[in-house]
Image: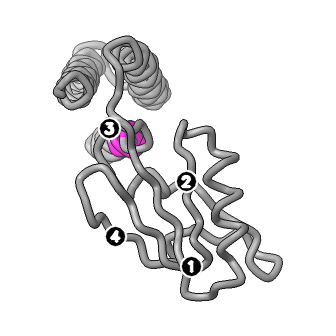
Amino acid sequence: MQDTILLNLEESMERSILALKREFQTIRTGRANPQILDTMTIDYYGTQTPIKQLAGVTVPEASQLLIKPFDKSTLKAIEQAINDANLGLSPQNDGMQIRLIFPRLTEERRKELVKVIAKMAESGKVSVRNERRNGVDAIKKLSLPEDEERIYLDEIQKLTDKFVAKTDEELKIKEKELMTI
């Protein structure tokens, strides 16, 4: 039972790290990255549908995304979704496709984005710590002998430390990506 709790705890902490990585992917770094569109949806025949399911997205140049809708009637809706997302990008619609050109980030903007990702990373750490609390509660409910309980609580703390360190690693990677010109 205790080992199951530890395994479930590790899985949920891993999911927290994956969620943080997905969040980091939505931050633009001056280079075209199709994943910036992952969170955007449009109303397509009454259903909220991700843009990536409605269009082909390619990277013809390092600083440009090309979005070619499969159904031309969705072009305006895709353009509106990109505008509404406040990415700081101006979609260029030529009637057949949309181009997103990523301007170079200024030093000031890079520093602002580093602060934003630091907040995201702190949120990730909070999520990991919440999972730790859930694990500790689950172990304490088992009414184990005190020394055995201490062993499992130490294991939970080691897991927490491991995943907090992973969060810091992901932050450093993204920070380096942002600050690289």
Of badges 2 and 3, the one in the foreground is 3
The one nearer the camera, 41 or 120, is 41
Mark 1 to mark 3 CA distance (whole Å): 25 Å
Q: Is residue 12 above or below residue 96?
A: above
Can residue 12 be seen here? The reply is no
The residue that disc 1 covers is 54
Residue extending furthest toward the right:
46
- Image point 39% across, 55% down: which residue? 35
Q: Position of residue 128 (x, y in %)?
A: 39, 27
Task: Tell me the crowding category of disc 3: few under 14, some 14 to 19, or many 20 or more residues within 10 angstroms, Cα based.
Answer: many
Residue 112, quarter of picture: top left
Q: Is residue 73 above or below residue 67?
A: below
Of badges 4 and 2, the one in the foreground is 4
The residue that disc 4 covers is 58
Of badges 1 and 4, the one in the foreground is 4
For the N terminus, which image quadrant? top left
Disc on the earlier residue, 1 or 3: 3
Name the kind of residue labelled 1 in the image. Answer: Leu
The one nearer the camera, 89 or 55, is 89
